[in-house]
Image (tube, rainbow, N blue to C red):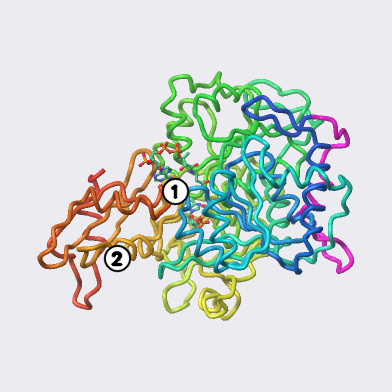
Amino acid sequence: MNLPSTPQTAASNSNLFAALRSAFPADLDAVAIETDNDLHYTWRDLVRATAMMANLLASLDLPAGARIAVQVEKSVEAAMLYLATLRAGYVFLPLNTAYQSAEIEYFIGNAEPAVVVCSPKNFGWVSKIAFKAGTQNVFTLGDDRTGSLLERAVHCSDRHTPVHSAADDLAAILYTSGTTGRSKGAMLSHGNMLSNALVLKDYWGWKQPGASLVTSGASVAPGGDVLIHALPIFHVHGLFVALHGALINGSKMIWLGKFDPKLVLRKMPEATVFMGVPTLYTRLLAEPGLDANAVRNMRLFVAGSAPLLIETFTAWQERTGHTIVERYGMSETAMLTSNPYAADARYLDGQGVPESERRGGTVGFPLPGVSLRVQDDDGKPLPTGEIGGIQVTGPNVFQGYWRMPEKTAEEFTPDGYFKTGDVGKIDERGYVTIVGRSKDLIISGGYNVYPAEIEAYINELPGVLESALVGVPHPDFGEVGVAVVVARPGAVLVAEQVIASLKSKLANFKIPKRCVVVDELPRNTMGKVQKNLLRAQYQSAT
Ligand code: MLC
Ligand code: AMP
């Protein structure tokens, strides 16, 4: 199997922005991004605006490795800020716009960013938190090209040479909540992300501008792939897989501020690639207009971030004639596995057969360069078909958790494999199937919810003795949280009030969709709460 080449020599620049920039088309005046409010950005706009923002960052005299924390609504300028941070050699720290003040306080206190960029409407409370934590520079950026960041950047030069970065220099920190309730910052390097972007470009057969593109129905002339970008840009899926994918191929993007199934359907005839979490696919399937004609120019549908139900996979095939490519990844590793894009003699299975089949219910094969194995709790490798913990290694695997060396050491095996916390198996043809998680995690609409974090908040509410949050199936979000709460002796708890009190404290996607008050939680002989019993009891609770 041939690996796409990654810059290796010490002298070469592994700066991710430099690599993405070198893939921009020769015609810099071609449209790179078209937005849902009809703005058109050329490749030259991307080059110039990221240079101006990089010069602004450089003018701030930040220390090497400075973190740039960003909590802003999705916009092209927000993506430019990410690229400018890479270009200037600093470390990007994206934050979900749903996070509330207590969550932001933790991230800023923990990461100690030198720069914080927030939405203009949040400047009051975010700047207070940032200044208290010692951050010197707080800018604003709106989703309508407003804010102090752009006001300052516009006075900076539009020429900038990307800094020289080594492959293991940090490029981003992504916070992933922890099983103990404390979020951990996963440190990703330029090399981690560049290697992953190059592998996916090849593996998913991205078609460059200029290529004549024959899809299942008609041929799309001759601009190459066009990506509908409908995901948020503060997590791996939207920020890395989708954005890097288009940029490293010089492909145009149709940029949607928010996922809207009707708008996606309207834009599909102009596009060839779509990426989404399973909820996006189920919401698209609910649109009567989704049929083979609507997707006639599409080449590739990718799903991930949460399990894609086989019903969704099959319904999509029946309605559109397209087979979704399901892939698997995580913040700590970017993409790990993918179902095959097409029969390709370069990618052979163990028997020398081209890997041509996209299998529903599986996440496909380890990507080139990724080594994936399944082990039991004692660290013994398991034979084909047996279920155990999934462990991985490869150039995409992160550098460790920010300022948590012990936690980092715990999550790696002595021979350098990262323990994903996912439970799965590998079949005789090499397909990986995820069957569950050893980490106590709920994935709701593609967002991770860590029960320990929510339980800690619930337990602090007046009148609460203890609580357990369990994930139950949900037709739209895949899985949602149900809070099971026990009142202190003599206290009266109202379920609706428990939920209402959480709303001001936690991001909206973390709010349990239902709360039930019970006399006691079921426990095993060791005293551990039996969440499996609660899951079974409340599985049709939402
Ligand atoms: C919104 N709500 C959610 C939710 N999103 N609740 C649970 N889970 C979610 N994901 C809440 C809202 O606050 C609201 O509550 C109610 O549910 C209905 O909201 P909505 O209007 O339907 O939500 P919407 O804004 O349309 O958002 C839904 C969504 C969004 C699916 C479009 O959640 C989304 O963009 N998800 C994608 C997440 C993603 O990019 N994940 C990638 C992670 S990277 P109320 O009470 O206010 O009415 C990763 C690695 C990898 O995992 O492998 O890729
Ligand atoms: P995050 O920490 O937000 O990056 O989420 C990563 C987790 O999402 C993984 O550890 C998996 O549990 C889950 N995940 C990602 N893709 C898939 C998939 N295709 N199927 C099942 N789970 C997935």
Quadrant placement of the C terminus: top left
Q: Main secondary structure of the magenta part?
A: loop
4 left or right of 422 in image: right
Q: Position of residue 58 (x, y in %)?
A: 80, 58
Cβ of mark 1 under 8 A from ligand 2 = yes
Q: Quadrant of ligand 1?
A: top left
Tell me the element at label 1. Answer: loop
- The amino acid type of the residue labelled 1 equals Pro
The region drawn magenta spans: 6-30
Foreground mark, 2 or 1, reads 2
Mark 2 or mark 1, earlier in chain: 1
Can you name the residue that lies furthest to the left here? 490
Tell me the element at label 2. Answer: loop
Q: Position of residue 395 (x, y in %)?
A: 68, 64
Determine if the magenta segment contains residue 29.
yes
Q: Residue at x 70, y 52 (%)?
A: 199
Q: Position of residue 486 (x, y in %)?
A: 18, 62
Q: Residue at x 59, y 78 (%)?
A: 415
Against 402, residue 103 (above or below) is: above
Q: Position of residue 387 (x, y in %)?
A: 41, 64
Instruction: Give the number of the disc on residue 7.
Output: none
Determine if the magenta segment contains residue 125.
no
Quadrant placement of the N terminus: bottom right
- The amino acid type of the residue labelled 2 equals Glu
